[in-house]
């Protein structure tokens, strides 16, 4: 009887031990589940500007460059137009002055035949008082010519110059006379600033 009881006690102890071990195993597993191994957190990378913001900046920079180029173009055109206007103003001012002088010259040219007649009258007049009056009128005409910067062309005794003279007759030379010389001025000529207003009509020695 005694040996059987001992076996029974031993068996009971073994069963209790196994139960105890089974109870401890779930607790250790739970512990393992509760405390998993810690992993290192990934390092934070520096944040980059969003693509949309970068595109906006690029677009803004391109627009600024375009506006600067446009401003330079407008500036260049403004300088060009200003220079053209200044040249036009000077040119038109010069043309206006030239037309004004030519208009005045046309008026004076209308007086040339009157001066011719006064000189012929002076040559044929015998009365001294009349001569003085004619001379005064001729002097006034000559003063007008000076004011208008008009010069008389009177090539008497000079070599014939086709640029300012018109030969209306050629005569045989007399003793001591040189060929091609103006022997007589039939009608005076006039010029201003090198431009002939009226050619002198002359008689030339052959």
Image (cartoon, rainbow, N blue to C red):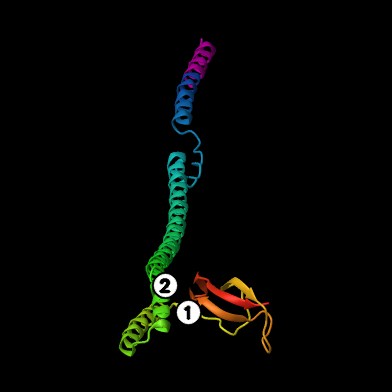
Residue 140 point in image, percent of width and height: 34, 82
| Badge 1 or badge 2: first in the primary sequence | 2
Name the chief secondary structure element in magenta: helix
Q: How many other residues sit within 10 Å of disc 2, few (<14), some (14-19) or many (≥20)?
A: some
Q: Which residue shows up at 47% across the image and 40% down it?
A: 51
Q: Quadrant of residue 107?
A: bottom left
Residue 50's place in the image compared with 110, above or below, is above
- Front position in the image: 92 or 32: 92
Report helix, strand or loop for mark 1: strand
For the C terminus, the quadrant is bottom right
The stretch drawn in magenta includes residue 120: no
Distance, label 1 to label 2, CA atoms, is 10 Å
Q: Which residue is mark 2?
A: 112
Q: Which residue shows up at 51% across the image and 36% down it?
A: 37
- Front position in the image: 167 or 54: 167
Q: How many other residues sit within 10 Å of disc 1, few (<14), some (14-19) or many (≥20)?
A: some
Residue 102 point in image, percent of width and height: 42, 66
Q: Which residue is mark 1?
A: 152
* Residue extent of the magenta highlight: 1-17
Question: Can the viewer see residue 192 in this picture?
Answer: no
- Front position in the image: 86 or 44: 86
Closer to us: mark 1 or mark 2?
A: 2
Q: Quadrant of residue 31?
A: top left
Report helix, strand or loop for mark 2: helix
Q: Tell me, yes or no, whether the two marked residues, 1 and 2, touch with CB atoms within 8 Å.
A: no
Question: Can the viewer see residue 115 in this picture?
Answer: yes
Q: Quadrant of residue 171?
A: bottom right
């Amino acid at each position: 009887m005694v040996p059987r009881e001992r076996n029974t006690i031993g068996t009971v102890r073994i069963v209790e031990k196994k139960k105890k071990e089974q109870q401890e195993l779930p607790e250790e597993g739970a512990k393992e589940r509760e405390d998993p191994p810690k992993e290192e957190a990934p390092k934070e990378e520096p944040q980059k500007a969003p693509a949309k913001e970068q595109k906006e900046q690029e677009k803004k920079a391109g627009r600024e460059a375009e506006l600067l180029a446009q401003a330079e173009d407008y500036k260049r055109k403004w300088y060009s137009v200003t220079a053209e206007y200044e040249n036009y103003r000077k040119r038109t001012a010069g043309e206006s002055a030239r037309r004004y002088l030519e208009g005045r010259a046309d008026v004076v040219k209308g007086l040339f035949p009157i001066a011719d007649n006064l000189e012929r009258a002076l040559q044929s007049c015998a009365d001294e008082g009349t001569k003085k009056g004619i001379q005064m009128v001729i002097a006034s005409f000559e003063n007008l010519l000076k004011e208008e910067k008009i010069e008389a062309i009177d090539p008497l005794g000079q070599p014939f110059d086709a640029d300012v003279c018109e030969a209306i007759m050629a005569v045989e030379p007399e003793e001591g006379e040189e060929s091609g010389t103006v022997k007589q001025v039939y009608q005076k000529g006039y010029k201003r600033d090198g431009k002939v207003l009226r050619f002198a009509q002359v008689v030339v020695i052959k």
